[in-house]
Amino acid sequence: MPMHGDETCREAGASSEAPSSGTACSPLSGADDRETVPSPGDGAASSSSVRPPLRLEALTVFPEMFEPIMSTSIMGRARRAGIFEFEAHDLRDWTHDHHRTVDDAPFGGGQGMLMKPAPFYEAIDDLCPQDDPACVVFFTPTGERFNQKLAQQLSQESRILFVCGHYEGMDERAYRLATRCVSIGDYVLTGGELAALVVCDAVVRLLPGALGDDDSARFESFSDDGLLEYAQYTRPASYRGMDVPPVLLSGNHANVDRWRKADALVRTCELRPDLIAGARLTDRERFVAARVRERLEVGGSSREALVEFAYAALR
Ligand code: 6GU
């Protein structure tokens, strides 16, 4: 499957030829279109409000791939708690031949098989009527790159249908059904199911209540300040000669925060320098990051020494 950057995907409504099925989730709206509604039976706290469950669905030739992941761990717990709902639809239910065929050979020749357009159109006609629209997310290596910002946008939707392709890809006309086309990285998978599960996981953990502690989603890599997450340690304080940085044992919260910022800055400078420009940093932090990067370029400083330097410089 080629990973060329052509304009395979179009936003719904961007073309007058857009299909008539109801779709939502314009990246331009980007807004909180999930209204809060009063919680049923929430008498004691009637002034509070809860969102209805996020409705996640998949259209796939392997519906059985989803259930184990969707019922395990944090996603399983959130689903049982009614924070989201999930249903997988078998694309073959929208075929009409004996063999339930979803693929065919490409016009013009070439290797492999393509997904036929008709099952997708008929499925989405049925699944997304005008009065029950969904954000229709197609998975393809030519899609926009999935990231935390897109996860956040999707977590604001009320209904998302993930459409998973297979074989060498889909008939180009199928992509017109997409609200957005998404890739999870520059590598080729055999199908969109694992990509859909990755996206579901990243989206579900952003839903209020999914993590139990609503803060833990916020102070992490790619979410709060745009830096990689700082190192964390638990007991024992010394293990096989490796000691926890003493400041973390000190009980001085200001110093702990400063050490964590220093560690996050150094890691990001070292491992993902491309993130520094877009990170939300104070002038001081940006200055320290620049000094750290100079030292990294010169070489010869250990990670520990760089964190010590940044920790002192951030004072
Ligand atoms: Cl979304 N699909 C496939 N088939 N391969 C991929 C991908 C998606 N994202 C990265 N590689």
Image: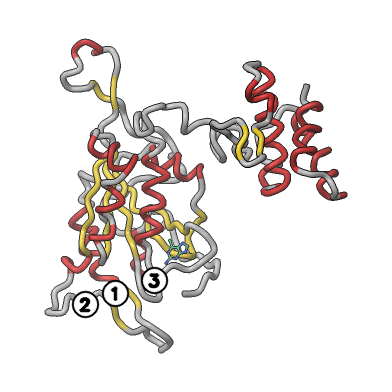
Task: Tell me, yes or no, whether the two marked residues, 2 and 1, touch with CB atoms within 8 Å.
Answer: yes
Residue 172, which numbered label? 3
Q: At label 3, which amino acid type do we have?
A: Glu
Read off the residue under disc 2.
Answer: 101
Cα distance in 3D space between marks 3 and 2: 18 Å
126 or 302: nearer the eye? 302
- Mark closer to the chain start, 2 or 1: 2
Answer with left or right where residue 49 lies relative to residue 122: right
Whether label 1 lies within 8 Å of ligand 1 gets the answer no
Secondary element at image label 3: helix
SS assignment at label 1: loop
| Residue in the foreground of this view, choosing between 178 and 201 | 201
Determine which quarter of the picture holds residue 102. bottom left
- Badge 2 crowding class, 10 Å Cα cut-off, few under 14, some 14 to 19, many 20 or more, is some
Tell me which corner region of the image, top left, top right, bottom left or bottom right, holds residue 27.
top left
Query: Residue flagged by tag 2: what amino acid is it?
Result: Thr
Whole-number angstrom distance, CA of label 1 to CA of label 3: 9 Å
Q: Secondary structure at mark 2?
A: loop
* Quadrant of residue 266 within the rendered picture: top right
Q: Which mark is residue 19?
A: none
The residue sitting at 80% across, 40% down in the picture is 292
Residue at 33%, 62% in the rendered image:
164
x%, y% of residue 13?
A: 38, 52
The residue at the far bottom in this view is: 109
Which one is in front, 255 or 140? 255
The image shows residue 288 at horizontal and vertical percentages of 79, 33
The residue singled out by tag 1 in the image is: 116
Quadrant housing the C terminus? top right
Mark 1 and mark 3 lie on one chain; the one further toward the N terminus is 1
